[in-house]
Image (cartoon, coloured by chain):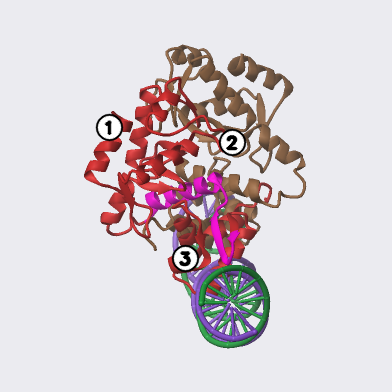
Chain colours: A red, B brown, C green, D purple
Amino acid sequence: MREGPDIARIASLVGDPARANMLNALMGGTALTASELALEAGVSLPTASSHLSKLMEGGLLTLASQGRHRYYGLAGPQVAGMIEAITGVAASVGPQRVRPGPRDGAMRVARVCYDHLAGEQAVAMLDRLVEKEILLRDDKEIRLGQLAASHFAAIGIDVDAKPRRPVCRACLDWSVRRSHLAGTLGAAILDKILLEKWARREKDSRAVIFSPPGKQAFERVFLG
Amino acid sequence: MREGPDIARIASLVGDPARANMLNALMGGTALTASELALEAGVSLPTASSHLSKLMEGGLLTLASQGRHRYYGLAGPQVAGMIEAITGVAASVGPQRVRPGPRDGAMRVARVCYDHLAGEQAVAMLDRLVEKEILLRDDKEIRLGQLAASHFAAIGIDVDAKPRRPVCRACLDWSVRRSHLAGTLGAAILDKILLEKWARREKDSRAVIFSPPGKQAFERVFLG
DNA sequence: CGCATAGTTCGTTCCTCATCGAAGCATTCT
DNA sequence: AGAATGCTTCGATGAGGAACGAACTATGCG
């Protein structure tokens, strides 16, 4: 026994309700301060601080100090992926949280996943982009098609910038069980959606709510 | 807070070392009895029994009673996927288990993942099958190509049988970080490999060791 | 039937760890 | 400088849960 990586260590970090709530909040993609996370998790500040240092030690979080604020964020896409995987299992085996609730419905349609859009809308978008050969899908690796540069330039997104992160990545959706678009392009598209005010973020939730005209605009640009 | 599925509940089940060891052992794909799992986890039988009932209650395991034996197995591919995801994080953030060890090396090359082959060999195999257009890869969904039926029939695998489980599925590899082939076809190929004695399973481990001639045969059939 | 094997249930012990209040640093504002 | 904010560290408390031995149930064997 006890050969591979220490999975119990990582899982037990996620296994505490307070920490799980914090991680869930951070799946929203924006880094949060200790106080915000304490509020989110429903614990006192000292307790939250203790949890955060454990998550840091476990390598699940990154820390950016800015003056007297300390912003905690998920350590990376791999961690986000793990949390989505656990969420998927919890959603399917769980005693199915009594009422699906309007919030859950909205979450299924569109939500923030780390730094990009997830949910039915996002899955449909990726499918359509692949169908139009703007993106080429080949396993986890999504690549830009010939048409990508001009198509995205037309809506103000530059796909030629070469950051360290991959431009395209597939990310498995826990509600739909199909992939949606992650990577810098996925992030840029989410930015665009929020910037154009096609949709707004539900307060204190990962849900993303499209306005009727916003939805039309989104569908025209990405599903048309 | 506390909106989505109860992720802490699931994670804390995996978060106990004894239970984590059991789950790890079950990633070998074969169902095991309570005593075997107790041995694997290094705990007494009563303790193991208690853990097993918790895992059952959490929906992570299935139980098949046969006479006085009770065989526990992973509840499904989704659970296996979650464990791989956690393993991936643990492997990359962990204080990198002191010595990689020969066993870990073997694990990287080829290992059992639930019921199919994983590791470098498995990733290479899927890549080659897609390259030869025997399989068509489109996101998580891998489909059979035109050539699939005849190609697999030639080596004694019938891909026309229609079970409830998908024939092909992509499964993310924690060591290589690319997908390998799961589903009934993945399982059938692993069966073939073991049946032909191209490789043997390391005792009490998920590692799969190819014999030199076995490796040649495997490469001729799947990588040629 | 009795005995052995496989497994669960019960009760107790023990230890880890989550929690919070109070106090201590650090940074910014005035 | 002094005060206010943001966060961490310390210490004490308490609850949950992991562990095992002993007793109990169930299946199989002679």
Front residue of A153 and B80: A153
In the rendered structure, the answer to whether residue B52 lies left or right of residue A4 reads left
Disc 2/disc 3 C-alpha distance (Å):
33 Å
Q: Which residue is mark 2?
A: B177
Task: Check residue A159 for magenta coloring.
Answer: no
User: What residue is rendered at 64% in x and 50% in y?
Assistant: B93
Q: Secondary structure at mark 2?
A: loop
Q: Which residue is mark 3?
A: A36
Give the percent coordinates (x, y) of residue B164. 37, 33
Q: Which residues are magenta?
A: A65-94
Disc 3/disc 1 C-alpha distance (Å):
37 Å
Q: Nearer the viewer, mark 3 or mark 1?
A: 1
Q: Kindly tell me whether residue A52 is visible in this rendering.
A: yes
Question: Does A216 sit above or below residue B192?
Answer: below
Task: Check residue A76 for magenta coloring.
Answer: yes
Q: Name which residue type carries label 3.
A: Glu
Give the percent coordinates (x, y) of residue D17. 53, 68
The dot on residue A220 is 1
Q: Secondary structure at mark 3?
A: helix
Q: Identify the subunit bearing mark 2.
A: B
Question: Does B209 sit above or below residue C3?
Answer: above
Front residue of B13 and A185: A185
**Same chain for the residues under marks 3 and 1 in the image:** yes
User: What residue is rendered at 36% in x and 48% in y?
Assistant: A111
Question: Does A36 sit above or below residue B20?
Answer: below
Q: Secondary structure at mark 1?
A: helix
